[in-house]
Image (cartoon, rainbow, N blue to C red):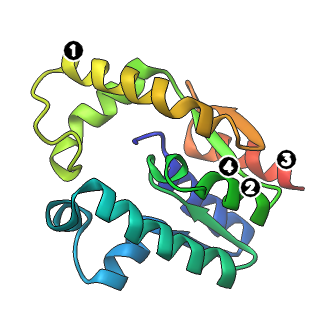
Amino acid sequence: MCSGKTSVAKHLAYKMSVKHIDLDDEIQKSKKSSINELFEKFNEIGFRNIENKILNRILKKETNSVISLGGGTPCYYDNMKKVCLSTKNVFYLKSTNKILAKRLFNSRADRPLISRIDNIESMLEFVSKHMFERSNFYEMAHYKINTVNKGIEQISNQIKSIIH
């Protein structure tokens, strides 16, 4: 969460003149509900089931596009394995827990898993725990991009140079 996946993916897709697909946007369109509403209605496991089905549909249908996933997507079912098998260009945008905690704290109202966290120390604890749990899945990506002190343009250029 808050690593810059969507921003970088949009910018990269634009620079490469290909379609950008945001998994969360596709879920919301398909279910005609916000991510928060889906979490409330179906709980996290129910949401992850919906997410998995829509991801599978996208992976079967889309080619020559940039897809941005939610932070939890790689950690459920066999999502990361499927994504890695569908393309040779899977990127993990890696930052520090402190940077992620600060970004998340400022955008927590829009995120169901963290909306009730009320101080930066608790957010850092949340981020550290989740990164510890999720890092094995993230590390399955073909490429790891250190995003610390880099802007969207620089990250996009780095990914573009790897792809080409």
The quadrant in which the N terminus is found is top left
User: Counting other residues with Cα less than 10 Å from the Cα at mark 3, is it few (<14), some (14-19), or many (20 or more)?
Assistant: few
Residue for badge 4: 156
Please give left or right for residue 94 compared with residue 6 in the image: right
Say whether disc 4 or disc 1 marks the residue closer to the N-terminus: 1
Q: Amino acid at mark 4?
A: Ser
Does dot 3 land on a helix, a strand or a loop?
Answer: helix
Spatial CA span between label 1 and label 2: 34 Å
Does dot 1 land on a helix, a strand or a loop?
Answer: helix
User: Counting other residues with Cα less than 10 Å from the Cα at mark 4, is it few (<14), some (14-19), or many (20 or more)?
Assistant: many
Rendered location of residue 67, percent (x, y):
60, 65
User: Counting other residues with Cα less than 10 Å from the Cα at mark 1, is it few (<14), some (14-19), or many (20 or more)?
Assistant: some
Spatial CA span between label 2 and label 4: 19 Å
Mark 4 or mark 1, whichever is nearer to me: 1
Say whether disc 3 or disc 2 marks the residue closer to the N-terminus: 2
Q: Amino acid at mark 1?
A: Glu
Does dot 4 land on a helix, a strand or a loop?
Answer: helix
